[in-house]
Image (cartoon, grey):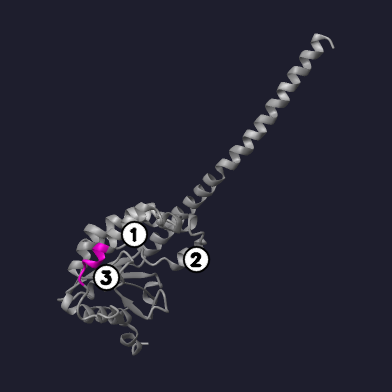
């Protein structure tokens, strides 16, 4: 074989080898970025859905706000700056939807159906009048909100539960007068709201970011955060007029006559 032909073969071999390496590199690149592509897709869906939900919320928020303000009494007041926080921020809502898409593998249709905290109000209630005021407010919501139903129909009781990183009562209702858009109502005492905002919430934000799934919850940092939150939960006084054996308020009887 003369040198000219030999050089041609050598060049051809180099080109073939380079092509194979390029193809291999492309395949590896695609494999490595598949997760990133899915992640970007979840972000786009979450951002778009959050925007749609917030825009829909704005169509009824004035009427809901007016009703919530009318439900205040001598013993029950809406929390400070409630107007500022009555609609969840786009970033917070988008982040919540994104995590459910990515980690819980829930469809966007199901996520939207079960989201219940993007319109929310918090009542601060006198401890001695707590049970009576909770029942009054829910009853008045049923009277003035049209046909109202809980977001979770099977939840016939509302309670204070130790170990759920939250102390107080949290309810979500859909009322046809407000296009059946979920309205979250939290019922706190001065004690529970103070501990929630100063102690529990900052810890829960860390827990929410670091302890996304069951596997991660087993990590030392997640267990430490859980123990700290439980300690603060136990420091909150449960109102005396709630059944101390199970910390429940049975809601069903107070709205049964309205239906």
Q: Earlier in the sequence, mark 3 or mark 2?
A: 2
The percent coordinates of residue 188 (x first, y second) are: 23, 70
State the CA–CA distance, disc 3 to disc 1: 20 Å
Q: Earlier in the sequence, mark 3 or mark 1?
A: 1
Query: Which residue is drawn at the image coordinates 40% and 63% (left, top)?
Result: 56
Quick one: 170 or 66, which is closer to the camera? 170
Helix, strand or loop at disc 3?
Answer: loop
Helix, strand or loop at disc 2?
Answer: helix
Q: Are marks 2 and 1 in contact (CB under 8 Å)?
A: no
Give the answer, above or below, for where 21 lies relative to 197. above
Query: Which residue is drawn at the image coordinates 37% and 72% (left, top)?
Result: 178
Q: Earlier in the sequence, mark 2 or mark 1?
A: 1
Specify the quadrant of the image occupied by residue 202: bottom left
State the CA–CA distance, disc 3 to disc 2: 27 Å
Q: Is residue 235 magenta?
A: yes
- For residue 88, the mark is 1
State the residue lying farthest toward the front: 220
Give the answer, above or below, for where 24 lies relative to 17. below
Query: Which residue is drawn at the image coordinates 76% and 13% (left, top)?
Result: 7
The percent coordinates of residue 109 (x first, y second) are: 51, 64
Query: What crowding class fits label 3: few (fewer than 14 Cα within 10 Å), some (14-19), or many (20 or more)?
Result: many
Q: Residue 66 vs residue 108: left or right?
A: left
Q: Which residues are magenta?
A: 231-237
Looking at the image, is mark 3 or mark 1 nearer the viewer? 3
Residue with the mark numbered 3: 168
The percent coordinates of residue 146 (x first, y second) are: 36, 80
- For residue 110, the mark is 2
Q: In the picture, which quadrant includes the N terminus? A: top right
């Amino acid at each position: 074989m003369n040198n000219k032909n030999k050089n041609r073969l050598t060049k051809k071999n180099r080109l073939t080898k380079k092509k194979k390496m390029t193809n291999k590199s492309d395949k590896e690149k695609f494999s490595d970025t598949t997760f990133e592509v899915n992640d970007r897709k979840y972000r786009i869906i979450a951002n778009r859905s959050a925007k749609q939900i917030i825009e829909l919320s704005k169509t009824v928020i004035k009427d809901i706000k007016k009703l919530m303000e009318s439900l205040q009494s001598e013993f029950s007041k809406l929390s400070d700056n409630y107007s500022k926080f009555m609609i969840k921020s786009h970033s917070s809502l988008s982040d919540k939807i994104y995590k459910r898409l990515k980690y819980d593998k829930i469809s966007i249709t199901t996520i939207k159906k079960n989201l219940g905290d993007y319109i929310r109000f918090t009542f601060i209630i006198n401890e001695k009048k707590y049970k009576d005021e909770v029942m009054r407010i829910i009853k008045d919501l049923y009277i003035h909100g049209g046909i109202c139903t809980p977001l979770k129909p099977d939840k016939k009781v509302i309670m204070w539960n130790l170990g759920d990183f939250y102390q107080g009562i949290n309810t979500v209702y859909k009322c046809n007068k407000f296009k059946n858009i979920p309205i979250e109502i939290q019922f706190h005492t001065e004690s529970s709201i103070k501990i929630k905002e100063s102690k529990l919430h900052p810890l829960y934000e860390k827990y929410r970011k670091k302890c996304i799934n069951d596997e991660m919850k087993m990590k030392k940092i997640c267990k430490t955060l859980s123990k700290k939150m439980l300690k603060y939960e136990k420091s909150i006084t449960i109102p005396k007029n709630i059944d101390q054996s199970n910390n429940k308020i049975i809601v069903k009887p107070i709205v049964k006559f309205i239906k």
